[in-house]
Image (spheres, grey):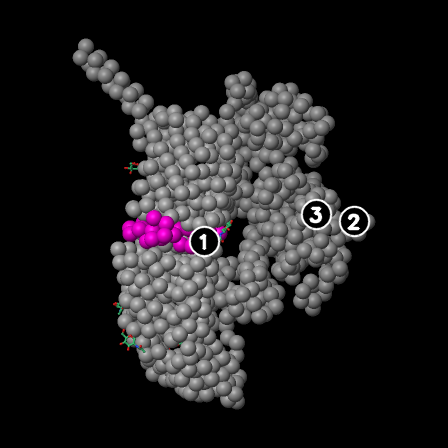
Amino acid sequence: MELMESLLFFLIMISIFQQSSSSTNPGDVSALKSLSEKWKNAPPSWGKSGDPCGESGERWEGVLNCSNSRVTELKLFNMGLEGTLSSEIGSLTGLQSLDLSYNKDLEGELPSSIGMLKQLHTLRLIACKFSGIIPNELGNLQNLKILALNSNQFSGKIPASLGRLSHLQYLDLADNQLNGTLPTSATEGSGLDRLWAAQHFHFNKNQISGPIPSDLFNSSMTVMHILLDNNKLTGEIPDTIGLVNSLRILRLDNNSLNGSVPSSINSLTNLSVLNLANNNLNGAMPNLTGMDFLNYLDLSNNSFDPSEAPNWLSGLNNLTTLIIESGGLQGQVPQEIFSFPQLQEVRLNNNSFSGTLNMSTKITQALKIVNLRNNSITSVTLSSSYNDTLILIENPVCGNVQLRHTGYCQDQQPDSQFNSWNNVTCSQPYEGQIVSRAPYFGYIQNHLNNLEERIQEKLSRTGVNFLVQDVFFDKNSYLNIWLKFCNSSGKSFTRNDILNSLDLNTQDLQLPENIGPSVFYPSHYAFQKRVIRGLTIGIAVGCAIGVLIIAGLAIYAVRQRKQALTAIYLRNPFASWGSFGEDAGDAPQLKGARCFSLDELKRCTDDFSKANEIGSGGYGKVYKGVLLNDQIVAIKRSQKGSTQGGLEFKTEIELLSRVHHRNLVELVGFCYEKGELLLVYEYIPNGTLKKNLSGSSEIQLDWKRRLMIALDSARGLAYLHDHANPPIIHRDVKSTNILLDDNLIAKVADFGLSTFVLNSEEGLISIHIKGTPGYVDPEYFMTHQLTAKSDVYSFGVVMLELITARSPIEKEKYIVKEVKMAINKNDKEFYGLKDLIDPTILKTGSLDGMHRFIELTLKCLAESPEDRPMMNELVKEFEILLTKHEIRRKSTSESSFGIEFQTERGVAEHPYDEIVLSSEVSTDAGYYSGQHLLPK
Ligand SMILES: *[C@@H]1O[C@H](CO)[C@@H](O)[C@H](O)[C@H]1NC(C)=O
Ligand SMILES: *[C@@H]1O[C@H](CO)[C@@H](O)[C@H](O)[C@H]1NC(C)=O
Ligand SMILES: *[C@@H]1O[C@H](CO)[C@@H](O)[C@H](O)[C@H]1NC(C)=O
Ligand SMILES: *[C@@H]1O[C@H](CO)[C@@H](O)[C@H](O)[C@H]1NC(C)=O
Ligand SMILES: *[C@@H]1O[C@H](CO)[C@@H](O)[C@H](O)[C@H]1NC(C)=O
Ligand SMILES: *[C@@H]1O[C@H](CO)[C@@H](O)[C@H](O)[C@H]1NC(C)=O
């Protein structure tokens, strides 16, 4: 009896426990639902009835923590959310942490109800598209420690109410369109001067105007980083700045400040980074005596009185970077500086230094660049141990006949700063960049190890590998560090992977101090569509019976051994389902694909009405339909009585249910009923590449977009060749089998003619020639020897279409032949194909990379399969082309400074194609992650 009682008690306890731990406060549930009603692309779990705070399987993605059935932590960063933030957010009053960053299409105003989240200690809305003013009500969030609204489109004035956030440690409003003056309490009752706990004031890249208020600074502050660069500040630097002894970084560059620098500035004895460049500061060059911690100093491009190099320079022996360009400096270059142990970079160009440059003794090992361009130096004594960059061009000393032809008197390209020989690869990497807005150094080498260690540590035990792809300074002197992350399993990332493992917000990352104030900006990630499994019971039963029958057939088949198996296989393609490896015995256990009833498909296509017909594929017609869950699909229906259809149908389902990749059209499900074979695919709205190239759609594909399409479809095919198990040869690669989605991402379609590669060494002997005239590999045509290289050939024809927008066979002319005849290797721009290039792309935008692209196309079209590249090699090539295209674009469109390292390496001065095409140059340049892999 006692036993019974305790058992009962135990059971009751369990049920109570389950209830309290897994049922979310109904108010929170409905608030979350209201949020998602305003969003496109809310995570799939949000559409279901499950419990937001429930156990792991049921819990909604992004609800990272709950307490007492209230949602306390909501993170949906980089989920591709589109839409607005509902004012219902104000009902989630249990929230302590909210992060909706990197949803670049999350727009509209920030609702003032956000001021009701009194428990909030962290609010991150980085790099969305919020606009309008920053609501005053944020000042009510008394527990707020981290407020990051950077990289949005907020406008208007910084609200003075923020000054009430007495616990705020991190304030980042950078990279918006904020204007007006900096609010302080003297004029507005409350203001930034009261933020005594704040260590970070990041207001860079806005339109903030007016003078810097002198009461902004006081000795109660503990601020370490003040970033006010790239604004519209005027007036003098107030001498109260000297009160903020905690300062480590002060960037006031790229404003219109004037007057002389207050002498109090040298009270900032903890300062590591001081940048006052590009203002109208005048008077004497500031006296920086005693600022012994300075690592990075930039005083360039002001209007200081001409003077000799100041004495204090010789005392700053912790400098890594010294930049005083156009500083009116004259006399001797002080030789002491070259022995500062950490000094890496000296830029004193455009001054009036004269006499002898003495670099004869004790030059620090760290020194990499000395730029003295355009001075009046007449002679040089140089230690033979210094073999790094020294730029003396435009100095009288270069009149010296012996010197004139040395590197010192020529435009020099310093060694590449960054080399990555790492080779983390995967088909769907997560990528992003850390942007550091004031690193303590100006030369990259040797400074990244700590950073890599920190990230490694953060990712340990997550099974994520990463690689630093590229590092450079942009025109704002911000350090850009491009990262790439791969799942060690090779699988693509899920939402939960990203939210849990790849939250690389820089506050938690605790980067080494010398990296400076940084922000992580991940790139948009295309999640794989998860197939909704909510089946109506009828369908589920229908399929279950089907499974039983098939299983029965399979058992029967096994008993009857081979002949019988073949017979049943022909009658019922599902009989041998799962005969490949691990699936054995699992009848149509279609990973992700769903079994539909014919009725359901009839309903969603209006009984296969003519109006819904969107094309005819290899074996039948294709209809557009809308499923019960509102998903739009394309349904392929076989022609009745097509015997071939049955087999192909099975092949397709088997293949497609195994294959998931963002550049392959996804199988949503299938139907096999009443002799009907139907395949349900995701619907790809923008139609075929062919249609889009033919000019019959409104979309204009410029050259860069075409490169991206080439990359996307190559990725899809490379996945089929290298990652599908078993490998798959498409066999019908053509421009009508490449579809473009909403974002013009290319997806390869139609594996109806695909076939397994049984022996990847020797290829598969195929009996029937398949494929489409104009695209078929001549080698395959003659030998019936099918290899992945046959796809490469067909893809080469598609590449030609991207260049020319012509059909492979037009007016009885075969484009491949025409192109091969027109080729002129001496034409460094277009290979002699200028007349064949699609006039549309000649008109719009740059043709960067065209020459290399043509070269690759010709390799793909090589007669002999061995001479053709592998698909994955093409992927790498296209990635390189696009990276360069991108960087080139940056450096030409942002003309005022260009990207420093590029100009120094001469990328900007040389014709672009030379860089692209010469593998030697590009390998030397090193900062591109890839290498040219193709045999020359
Ligand atoms: C969830 O929140 C509670 C208190 O709010 C906290 O103690 C706990 O560490 C959090 N759990 C996680 C996994 O963040
Ligand atoms: C700030 O911008 C708003 C609109 O964005 C404009 O109405 C206002 O006049 C601007 N204020 C200043 C001081 O420039
Ligand atoms: C710079 O300041 C130091 C100490 O503050 C002082 O000793 C020195 O004379 C000053 N130098 C100049 C040129 O004013
Ligand atoms: C200079 O840097 C070294 C480390 O490289 C440090 O130990 C030293 O304290 C620094 N000196 C000053 C005056 O900042
Ligand atoms: C430069 O000199 C250092 C030692 O003085 C040597 O280790 C290094 O290899 C040299 N570099 C080049 C490019 O000659
Ligand atoms: C990748 O890099 C490692 C060393 O980092 C090397 O051992 C391996 O061979 C490389 N793999 C390829 C495919 O280049």
Residue 384 picture location, percent across and down: 39, 83
Where residue 333 is drawn, which disc sits there?
none
Cα–Cα gap, marks 3 and 2: 15 Å
* Residue at 38% from the left image edge and 38% from the top image edge: 115
Dot 2: element: strand
The mark lying in front, picked from 3 and 2, is 3
Residue assigned mark 2: 810
Which residue is outermost to the right? 811
Which residue in the rendered view is the most extreme toward the left? 2
Q: Residue drawn at (60%, 31%), measured in percent from left and top?
A: 632
- Magenta segment boundaries in residue numbering: 169-197
Q: Position of residue 201 (x, y in %)?
A: 36, 54
Question: Residue at left 51%, top 29%?
Answer: 532
Q: Identify residue type, mark 1.
A: Gly
Which class describes the residues within 10 Å of circle 2: few (<14), some (14-19), or many (20+)? few
Residue for badge 1: 180
